[in-house]
Image (cartoon, grey):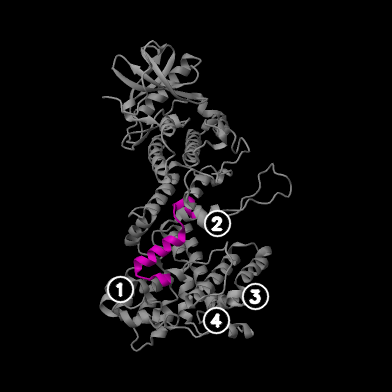
Amino acid sequence: MTAPATSAPRPPSGAATRRLGRFELRQLLGKSTATMAWLAFDPRLGQELMLTLPRAQPATPAALARWMDDARAAARLDHPNLAHVVESGVQEGWPYVACDRALGVTLAERLAGQPPPAPLEAAAWMCQALLGLAFAHEAGAGHGDLQLHHVVVGDNGQVRVMGLATAGTAAADMPAAASAAAAPGADPRRVQRLAAQRDVLACGLLLHRLLASQPALDEPDTALAIARMAPAGRDIVRLPWNTPHPIPEALRAIANRATANQERQRYLNARTLLQALDGWRAAEAADTGGPLALLLDRMRTVGHLPAMPGVGGRIARITGKEGQHTDDMAGQILQDIALSLEVLRLVNSAQVQGTQMGGSAPVLTVRRAVALVGLNGIRQAAAALRLWPGPLGAAGAEAMQRMIERARLAGHAAQVLCPAGYDPEVVFLVAVLQNLGRLLVQYHFADEAEQVWQLMKPLPPPPDAEPGTPAHPGMSEASAAYAVLGVDIESLGAAVARHWGLGEDVQHMMRRLPRERAVRAPDGDGDMLRAAASAANEAVDAAALLPPARLAQGLVNVAQRYARALEIGARDLQDALQAARAAMRTGQRVAAVDRGDAGAASAAPAPASARGER
């Protein structure tokens, strides 16, 4: 097998030749505190090889035997993203593993000889490396010293990791791993887990290097950079803003989480970092993969959302009584968020639009949907739902229940906050749809949802911080979702709404107003509905997430943001939440709250879209 065109040149004739046993050492490909990689020529095989060796010879025969045992065990692993070991052995007291140079060039060589890679290419390289590492970790093997010279890129773009388990005892230099291994009765699984986390952190540093075109902390050796990061050091690694290519916000969030200062925010295994990068790549390339494709597949398997307990009796009451008014039936359906959204999905499907609606605008009221699909349509919608709690465990079901209650509470609060003249059911459903992505992620990606919520929580200051040091703020929801899923939650919800047949006007309304921007006066009815729903959802979030001592100020902050758009104050928010809770308890329509002249002043006749006449 011949070496690729990108292989290193042979030394000129007459130049001094370095040897290791039978190998002719032609070029040092890279070195770290623990390992080194050489391009070598093997006269016996007549081909170039890449040798990985420890930086220091094993001190004792036992240490040499242990190095060889670990390296040979790792060499038996077979995966497309792990470099195949053609030979392992000892030359002049130096243990080594050898891989075929025809596999490609090291990432260090690739970066030295070509312009910085585009973000998509860099992410693709890291995804392949992570696939190989994840396979190795799950087989009980680790790398221990992942560096640029251990990642090989072929002419066809295939990436392989070489040098598994060649760091030897240097892999235990990380304080957490060292203390875990030295502890009496140390659990081998914990030691292995900590070593795998070190590999994932090294991947984060390599991703940083690819995107920033410079090593993190100006330290090319990932082991030395790790030693300067928490918990051993105090240095912080974040992507700079002056990068060769613009870095999309989602990818920046992933890269920064991979090297986060707080250990609890980092990726704990190769699969979670791989999932985030793959999700971002799929969303960026707008292909058929990624979280959206997985979400659509799961929705086909376990339904869109789980029906609330007692749905069978509710359907029997709705369909078993002739002559019921559509308002009464809609009121009972709205008690169940999953059933309400399923009815809307059904009526907005391409089949129903083609046969009954003649291409008209999307339906955004349950009573209009009931009139279109009839009792059989309601039964069909109910039959498509999984009974509570679907595939969720006890903890997931509890979190799902809280999310549903928050969405309903926001819907009722929005009815109070929205000026007169707008259909209350439309207002309710717009506020609920602003939670569609959160509801879907909570149901279909319960573990990932928990990661997102944990990343959003403030982090306490470190134990050795000065008294009075404030807590470290958590991530925003968008950044946390990027870091976990590779795509923000609202975009998932909007994509599902589009899949259901809801148009761009609905997708616009169901996106909450960005918290980092000032809220301006609404330009039209869609903006008014969006603002009222956003204000209600922010107030509900404040009530659910803020400690009691900070709730009053939190509501003041929300009121100040929406004062111009909705002409409300903090008292209006408190009254709206109180009225919404009362409606939740009684099951009755939300009680109107007297907002004085402010509400009348902002009221305006609403078009058919806001009145539900679709």
Quadrant assignment, res 568: bottom right
- Discs 3, 2 touching: Cβ within 8 Å: no
The residue singled out by tag 2 in the image is 476
Tell me the tag on residue 419. Answer: 4
Q: Looking at the image, which residue sits at the far bottom? A: 323
Q: Earlier in the sequence, mark 2 or mark 4?
A: 4
Q: In which quadrant is the N terminus drawn?
A: top left
Looking at the image, residue 197 lies above or below residue 318: above
Q: Residues within 10 Å of mark 4 (few under 14, many from 20)?
A: many
Q: Amino acid at mark 4?
A: Pro
- Discs 3, 1 touching: Cβ within 8 Å: no
User: Is any atom of residue 416 visible in this view?
Assistant: yes
Asked if the stretch drawn in magenta spans residue 147, the answer is no
Distance from the alpha carbon under mark 2 to that under mark 4? 30 Å
Q: Residue 159: horizontal and vertical position, in percent?
A: 36, 36
Q: In which quadrant is the C terminus drawn?
A: bottom left
Magenta-drawn segment: 481-506
Q: Earlier in the sequence, mark 3 or mark 2?
A: 2
The residue singled out by tag 3 in the image is 569
- Closer to the camera in the image, 452 or 253: 253
Residue 236 shown left or right of residue 77 in the figure = right
The residue singled out by tag 1 in the image is 380
- Closer to the camera in the image, 205 or 168: 205
Residue in the picture at 38% in, 27% down: 73
Looking at the image, residue 502 lies above or below residue 294: below
Asked if the stretch drawn in magenta spans residue 492, the answer is yes
Q: Earlier in the sequence, mark 3 or mark 1?
A: 1
Q: Amino acid at mark 2?
A: Ser
Q: Residue 195: horizontal and vertical position, in percent?
A: 49, 34
User: Is any atom of residue 577 visible in this view?
Assistant: no
Q: Residues within 10 Å of mark 2 (few under 14, many from 20)?
A: some
